[in-house]
Image (cartoon, rainbow, N blue to C red):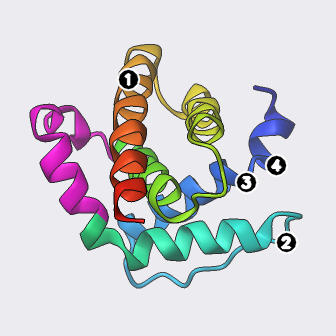
Amino acid sequence: MSKNNIDNNPRIIVIQKLYGKCINKDSELNIPKHRYKKFIKDVVTGTIERKEYINEIISSELKNEIRILKDLTLRIIIEASIYEIVFRPDTSSKIIINEYLNVADALIDDGKKRFLNAILDRLSRKLRDKKNERV
């Protein structure tokens, strides 16, 4: 991923904003001018507002992977992915997973990226199926 693609990727900005909020909970949430500003703001605020629910999913579905989830960047990528999978059903799971794997290219090592791919694939199937059962 080129430097320009990194700077313009809306999901990279999502992860940066969530990371900043995690490091400094009192920081103001400023979303930069971007053609996908509404999307970025929706995902960042939605992930923050539903953090408790997202953490319940992580605790129940990823209890065997908790050790590796101590990597803050990886955890934030998973949290934002879960938010999108559950609360943005108009976007296909495959697109969400692919986009966050692109983010992972820039932010985490290959071993963790393979782990992320497996987790997101498993979660998306489980969470989207569960959501479809309730409808």
Real-space Cα separation, disc 3 to disc 1, in angstroms: 23 Å
Say few, some or many: other residues with alpha carbon within 10 Å of mark 4 (under 14 / 14 to 19 / 20 or more): few
User: Mark 3 or mark 2: which is in front?
Assistant: 3
**Dot 3: within a 10 Å radius of its alpha carbon, few (fewer than 14), some, or many (20 or more) residues?**
many
Tell me if mark 1 has few (under 14), some (14-19) or many (20+) residues whose alpha carbon lies within 10 angstroms of its own: few
Q: Is residue 66 magenta?
A: yes
Disc 2, SS:
loop
Taking 126 as reference, is 36 left or right? right
Looking at the image, residue 39 lies above or below residue 69: below
Q: Closer to the N terminus: mark 2 or mark 4?
A: 4
- Mark 2 highlights which residue? 33
Q: Which residue is mark 4?
A: 8
Mark sitting on residue 118? 1
Is 34 included in the stretch rendered in magenta? no
The magenta segment is: 54-72
Indicate the amino acid at tag 1.
Ala
Point out the tag, 2 or 1, that comes first from the N-terminus: 2
Q: Quadrant of the C terminus?
A: bottom left
Q: Which mark is residue 10?
A: 3
* Mark toward the start of the polypeptide (3 vs 1): 3
Element marked by disc 1 = helix
Of circles 2 and 1, the one toward us is 1
